[in-house]
Amino acid sequence: MSHQAKYATAAGLLVLLSGCANMADSGSNVTASDPKKATRTGFLSDYAKMEKAPGGDGALCWRQPGLDLKAYNQVMISRMVVTLKDEQTKGVDPADLKALTDYFYKSLVTALKPQMEIVDKPGAGVVVLRIALTDLVPTSVGRSAMGTLIPYGFVAEAGSGVAAGGPAGSTPYLGQTGVEIQFLDGASEAILAECIDTQIGRKYAADVESGASGATSTWISGYMNSFQSWSYARNAFDKWSKQIAKRFAELRGISPQAK
């Protein structure tokens, strides 16, 4: 088959999958935590205390003993810091990074606003979120496309993540997104908690426990994201936002949807 025919076939497959992807979920399984890649940049105060967080998909956290989150009903999200992996991010458009931080901010607001007021100044009753996006790496779209065009590429790539010691379904050219988050008391600036995590894009992510329909939905979302440079980052942001909101609600003893 000629290169033109191969690309035409791939294009047809993309059109087909685009229609299916509209029926898929938001792709919470399209990224997976890789604790081995969690960064320790010095942005946070104490990495030695980090332990796997409940419901955090591999995220590592610590919090002050006796922390009473019921005393807080407002959230302030500080301006985010971004670092890149230099060897893999040459030519990254600064406008893309601004769009990514804006997206993460809006994702956090969407997740937290139902239960807590979003404010722009610190003070009593305010939890301040300081966030650093670390070792941000976009998907290598060209390599992802070529991997798809190679006969039996799906089968060959499906186990590559595990073989390399990474999450199942990940491949060497998919993006990764690290985060370091510090939660502060808005009045005293005392550190309440800290977390780190790195999410890796998965092109062929099949959650066997979710059954065939869940696996299919995840595969479709992962496949489509592998052709967009920063889609995996946005998926990671949405995942973290929901995890933070859920954990806040648990510690405050309310529903995540409650005001």
Image (tube, rainbow, N blue to C red):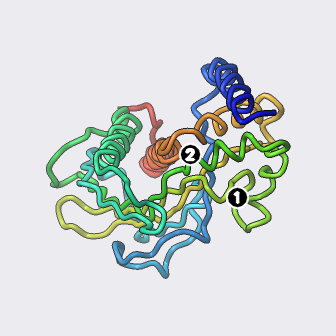
Q: Nearer the viewer, residue 81 or 109?
A: 81
Disc 1 residue crowd, few under 14, some 14–19, many 20+, Cα 10 Å: many
The x, y position of residue 15, in whole percent, is 64, 20
Front one among 88 and 84: 88
Q: Amino acid at mark 1?
A: Pro
Q: Mark 2 to mark 1: distance in Å?
A: 19 Å
Q: Is residue 10 left or right of residue 45?
A: right
- Quadrant housing residue 52: bottom right
Looking at numbered disc 2 in the image, what kind of residue is underneath it?
Answer: Val
| Residue at 56%, 71% in the rendered image | 51
Question: Which residue: 80% across, 46% down?
Answer: 153
* Quadrant that contains the C terminus: top left
Residue lying at 61% horizontally and 56% vertically, measured from the top left: 173
**Foreground label between 2 and 1:** 2
Residues marked 2 and 1 touching at CB (< 8 Å): no
Q: How many marks?
A: 2
Q: For this view, does 115 lie left or right of residue 21? A: left
Counting other residues with Cα less than 10 Å from the Cα at mark 2, is it few (<14), some (14-19), or many (20 or more)? Answer: some
Judge from the rendering whether residue 69 lies leftward or rightward of residue 20; answer left or right: left
The image's mark for residue 42 is none
Q: Where is mark 2, residue-wise?
A: 141
Residue 31 position, x and y percent, is 60, 48
Position of residue 53 relative to residue 25, above or below, is below
Q: Which residue is tagged 1?
A: 167
Q: Nearer the viewer, residue 4 or 231?
A: 4
Q: Position of residue 192 (x, y in %)?
A: 35, 66
Say what secondary structure mark 1 lies in: loop
Location of residue 20 with respect to 104 vertically, above or below = above
- Where disc 2 sits, the SS reads helix
Among numbered discs 2 and 1, the one appearing first in the sequence: 2
